[in-house]
């Protein structure tokens, strides 16, 4: 034990109080903030002096004793200094400071702890608090004063429980022990019952990995022992050896965060699956050391997992089969559709169609596109279900996107005599970063639905700039919050039906009325909007109309970064510059014939092949300016063809346009680099096809309407007759010779090519060239001849 160091304890010295009083708040703060340190310190002394043989094994029991001492100490520190000293009249058994010590003494006494044992342990509690003073930033005089205070605190505790203990007779102590013993026996039986009743097998092992005890379920499962509690009550020792348990404990690493493992173990009922986890004994006193191992039978779970795994495997196989089927059906349906829609577009370009023929071709085209839309919806749903649907955002001119969308829908609205309104907020950014295809798909579906379910009134597409816009994106671009709303005055949706409108194949409303469509549009639209980081919302009132809206945060981009290729006018009659050679490769005759007819009519030199191997040979022999190839072909497919072409030096930069009826090919093109420059799906959309040709071949189209005409230079015939031709700059006669020669044989294609050449030759020829172009559109050969004669005379 430690001797006191204060002055009143020194032999032959008179008891005195410190001459200087210091504030006690610093001492209180030090004690309150070092609870863990005090617990560790007293545990250190208890272990070093072997008191732990008589004390608790759990750390929280030691923490409770520290709190029990610190709480009255902190309370006492708030009292005046003169109340700390001892006096002969004090009844320490009623001292509030000593209350915890007295209570602990009673508790330990009922456990058979003697007064000397308890008092000596209390000396080490005193020492732990005195040691704490070394951590404080106190002057020597201040430390001596606080030492005196702590001594007085523990003096009063010790005097309190010693006085209470001395007033207790031996019979009273014996009665206390008997009562406590009964309580402990009941407590022990309770925990023994819990231990034996556990559904998991539990093993206790010592430090040498020897079995100390097991519960009933462990005995029944892994041993021949019978009877609950037999090991405990019969006092039997375990000589049992379980090799699997020994191997597990030898490899057990308590520092690992997840030490559970699954093992297939032999049992009395045959081999079964178990989840095994172990933990070192929680014993800070180090009186009981070793491990607790718990084995939970998970055989039923493993069987369920195996069943689920097999079911998942079968589901994946079925899903794969469905994907293959859809891909095959898509390809097989798109291929004839490519011929139907392709030749329909070609026929519509004929200049001599009657109105009835034009109308009939429009019907064919509408039916084809309707079938194509149904195919696309099923494929989109399949991609959503397999979590393969992705967005491909790029810079887009937002007003053009919205105005073009409304222009497409406008004819449908006019057929039903419905007003289609586009309401654009003037604060909207011009350029945004978004997946144009998917945004148009969502809005197209909402607008089509609105027109479909509206008999009279209006359909409005409103795009508003929200007030909480202009947020900074992490990449320093400006984010605009935009709300897109489609509102109609149609039949509306009931509250009961609103819950179902986003489910696949659901068509709500009057079931007696038939509305076209698969019932997938809103399902797909909702998923696409979710991919964009938003939610498609709806509010509706029957008989009044419906309103669908969603909000998007879109990054603003500069208009200069939007690389739009303007789609050429439908009536393309040729192109400028030298003749270009194009190689078309497709194993289907109808697809090759369509492309060959289309390209030859535009004055391209066209070569063709039926597979990749033939295409490779044709490319080597003819050195085309562009290759248009299908992907799925016999002998050599489009992927292999492209790889072979790219491996040849002369074709490193050859433009290659891939065409396929398979949506999976489009996914591959979007995700990987197979060497293609562009991809277009079947059925071919002619404006898109022309735009890609223009981009890949760097050509300008000769169209029925000059793409770069200056409105100020387009003059009607009356104005032209009265205008002074001297205000025009006229080309010399030799530059007009080509037009005159073409005029003699009625070759208007060459005439338009020559007119386009004049405009590029000198921008001052523009007014003259535009006038020639207008006359050419009317096939006014005599007026063209007169204008050229006038130019030659003027020259």
Image: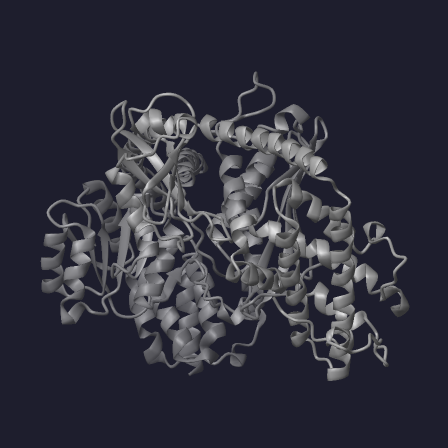
Residue drawn at x 59%, y 42% is: 536
Quarter of the image containing the C terminus? bottom left
In this orientation, does residue 722 appear?
Answer: yes
Residue drawn at x 47%, y 62% is: 774
Q: Quadrant of residue 366?
A: top left
The residue furthest front is: 12
Q: Nearer the viewer, residue 311 or 250?
A: 250
> x%, y% of residue 699?
34, 67
Looking at the image, residue 412 sits to the left or right of residue 314; the answer is right
Looking at the image, residue 572 sits to the left or right of residue 12; the answer is left
> x%, y% of residue 775?
45, 62
Looking at the image, residue 488 sits to the left or right of residue 741; the answer is right
Residue drawn at x 60%, y 33% is: 181
Q: Is residue 297 above or below residue 536?
A: above
Residue drawn at x 26%, y 36% is: 242
> x%, y% of residue 558?
55, 70
């Amino acid at each position: 034990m430690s001797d006191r160091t204060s002055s009143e304890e020194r032999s032959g010295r008179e008891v005195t109080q410190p001459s200087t009083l210091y504030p006690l708040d610093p001492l209180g703060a030090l004690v309150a903030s070092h609870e863990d340190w005090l617990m560790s310190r007293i545990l250190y002394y208890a272990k070093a002096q072997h008191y732990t043989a008589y004390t608790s094994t759990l750390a929280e029991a030691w923490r409770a004793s520290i709190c029990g001492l610190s709480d009255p100490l902190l309370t006492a520190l708030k009292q005046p200094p003169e109340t700390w000293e001892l006096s002969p009249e004090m009844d320490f058994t009623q001292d509030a400071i000593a209350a915890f010590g007295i209570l602990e003494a009673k508790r330990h006494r009922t456990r058979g702890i003697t007064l000397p044992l308890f008092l000596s342990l209390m000396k080490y509690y005193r020492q732990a608090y005195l040691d704490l003073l070394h951590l404080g930033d106190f002057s020597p005089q201040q430390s001596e004063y606080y030492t005196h205070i702590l001594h007085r605190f523990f003096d009063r505790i010790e005097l309190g429980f010693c006085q209470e203990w001395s007033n207790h007779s031996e019979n009273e102590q014996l009665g206390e022990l008997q009562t406590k013993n009964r309580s402990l026996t009941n407590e022990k039986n309770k925990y023994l019952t819990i231990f034996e009743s556990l559904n998991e097998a539990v093993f206790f092992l010592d430090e040498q990995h020897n079995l100390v005890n097991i519960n009933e379920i462990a005995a029944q499962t892994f041993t021949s022992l019978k009877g609950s509690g037999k090991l405990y009550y019969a006092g039997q020792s375990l000589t049992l050896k379980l090799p699997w348990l020994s191997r597990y404990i030898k490899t057990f690493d308590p520092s690992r965060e997840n030490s559970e493992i699954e093992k297939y173990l032999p049992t009395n009922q045959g081999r079964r699956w178990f989840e095994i986890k172990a933990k070192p004994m929680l014993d800070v006193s180090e009186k009981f050391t070793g491990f607790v191992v718990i084995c939970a039978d998970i055989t039923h779970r493993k069987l369920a997992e195996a069943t689920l795994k097999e079911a998942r495997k079968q589901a994946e196989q079925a899903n794969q089969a469905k994907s293959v089927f859809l891909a095959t059906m898509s390809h097989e349906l798109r291929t004839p559709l490519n011929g139907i829609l392709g030749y329909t577009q070609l026929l519509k370009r004929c200049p001599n169609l009657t109105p009835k023929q034009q109308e009939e071709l429009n019907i064919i085209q509408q039916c084809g596109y309707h079938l194509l839309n149904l195919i696309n919806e099923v494929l989109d749903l399949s991609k959503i279900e397999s979590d393969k649907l992705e967005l491909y955002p790029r810079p887009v001119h937002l007003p053009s996107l919205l105005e073009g969308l409304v222009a497409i829908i406008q004819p449908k609205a006019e057929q039903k005599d419905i007003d289609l309104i586009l309401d654009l907020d003037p604060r909207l950014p011009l350029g945004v970063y978004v997946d144009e295809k998917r945004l148009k798909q969502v809005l197209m579906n909402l607008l089509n639905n609105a027109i479909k379910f509206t008999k009279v009134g209006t359909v409005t597409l409103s795009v508003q700039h929200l007030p909480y816009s202009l947020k900074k994106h992490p990449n320093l671009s400006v984010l605009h919050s935009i709300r897109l709303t489609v509102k109609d005055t149609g039949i509306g949706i009931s509250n009961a039906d609103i819950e179902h409108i986003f489910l696949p194949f659901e068509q709500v409303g009057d079931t007696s009325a038939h509305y076209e469509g698969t019932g997938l549009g809103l399902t797909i639209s909702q998923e696409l909007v979710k991919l964009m980081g938003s939610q498609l919302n709806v509010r509706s009132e029957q008989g009044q109309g419906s309103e669908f809206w969603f909000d998007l945060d879109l990054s603003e981009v500069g208009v200069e970064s939007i690389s739009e290729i303007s789609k050429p006018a439908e009536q393309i009659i040729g192109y400028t510059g030298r003749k270009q050679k194009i190689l078309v490769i497709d194993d289907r005759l109808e697809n090759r014939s369509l492309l060959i007819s289309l390209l030859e009519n535009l004055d391209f030199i066209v070569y063709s092949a039926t597979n990749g191997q033939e295409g490779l040979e044709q490319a080597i022999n003819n050195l085309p300016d562009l290759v248009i190839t299908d992907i799925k072909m016999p002998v050599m497919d489009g992927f292999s063809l492209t790889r072979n072409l790219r491996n040849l030096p002369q074709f490193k930069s050859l433009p290659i346009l891939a065409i396929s009826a398979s949506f999976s090919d489009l996914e591959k093109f979007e995700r990987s680099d197979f060497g293609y420059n562009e991809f277009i799906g079947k059925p071919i959309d002619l404006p898109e096809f022309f735009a890609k040709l223009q981009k890949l071949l760097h050509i300008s189209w000769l169209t029925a309407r000059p793409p770069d005409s200056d409105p100020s230079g387009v003059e009607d015939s009356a104005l032209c007759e009265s205008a002074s031709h001297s205000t025009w700059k006229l080309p010399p006669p030799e530059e007009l010779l080509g037009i005159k020669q073409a005029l003699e044989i009625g070759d208007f294609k060459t005439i338009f090519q020559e007119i386009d050449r004049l405009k590029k030759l000198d921008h001052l020829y523009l007014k003259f060239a535009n006038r020639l172009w207008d006359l050419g559109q009317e096939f006014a050969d005599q007026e063209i001849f007169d204008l050229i004669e006038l130019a030659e005379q003027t020259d």
